[in-house]
Image: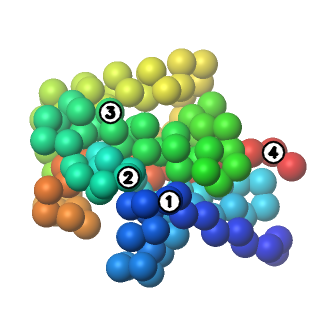
Amino acid sequence: MSQLQYYTYPDYGFRLRETYSYNQAVRVGDRIECSGQGGWNPTSGEIKKDLHEEIDQAFENVDYNLKNAGGKGWSQVFRVNTYHTDMSDEALDHMVKNLRKWMPDHQPVLTVVGVAKLGREDMRIEVEVSAYIGA
């Protein structure tokens, strides 16, 4: 197996690593695997109060995380797993809107899971991805 390279973005990412002992991404060969991203501000950690803004921010955080790990962003994503405490049509429709915005030229494989609670009490969505970055 190739050498694993771990990545954590500054500010809130560093605080999560120190508090919970995990990194935001790992490069494994020609892939980047990302930890689930919530709708938090990547500097302060504050979660957006508005559901749509929280979903938007989670997708922005995935892009930031991929680029911090040396990827190009959403264009390389082939797998998306989303976890939701709110499985309403409104929430899922907005998630799909973000999938189309961030990946206009391809559709990844997708798993959507409803859960009772996420890693923080105020989180309503978490987005986890796998990306192929090439050799």
Q: Earlier in the sequence, mark 1 or mark 4?
A: 1
Residue that numbered label 1 is attached to: 10
| Placement of 102 over or under 132, stated as above or below | above
The quarter of the displayed image where residue 52 is located: top left
Q: Nearer the viewer, mark 3 or mark 1?
A: 1
Marks 1 and 2: CB-CB under 8 Å?
yes
Q: Nearer the viewer, residue 62 or 78?
A: 62
Mark toward the viewer: 3 or 4: 3
According to the picture, the residue beneath numbered tag 2 turns out to be 43
Q: Position of residue 33 (x, y in %)?
A: 59, 58
* Mark 3 or mark 4: whose residue is earlier in sequence: 3
Using a 10 Å C-alpha cutoff, classify the residue at mark 4 as few (fewer than 14 neighbours), some (14 to 19) or many (20 or more): few
Callout 3: SS: helix
Mark 3 residue type: Asp
Dot 2 amino acid type: Thr
Check disc 1 and give the amino acid type: Pro
The image quarter in which residue 7 lies: bottom right
Q: Secondary structure at mark 2?
A: loop
Q: Depth check: 22 or 83 in front?
A: 22
The residue drawn where x is 59% and y is 24% is 106
Q: Which residue is mark 4?
A: 134
Q: Is residue 130 left or right of residue 52?
A: right
Q: Residue at x 45, y 74 (%)?
A: 17
23 shown above or below 19: above
- Mark 3 crowd level (few <14, some 14–19, many ≥20, 10 Å Cα): some
For marks 1 and 2, the one nearer the N-term is 1
Residue ID at (25%, 25%):
93
Q: CA distance from mark 3 to mark 1?
A: 20 Å
Q: Could you tell me how far apart the alpha carbons at marks 3 and 4 are, in whole angstroms?
A: 27 Å
> Between marks 3 and 2, how big is the CA–CA gap?
16 Å
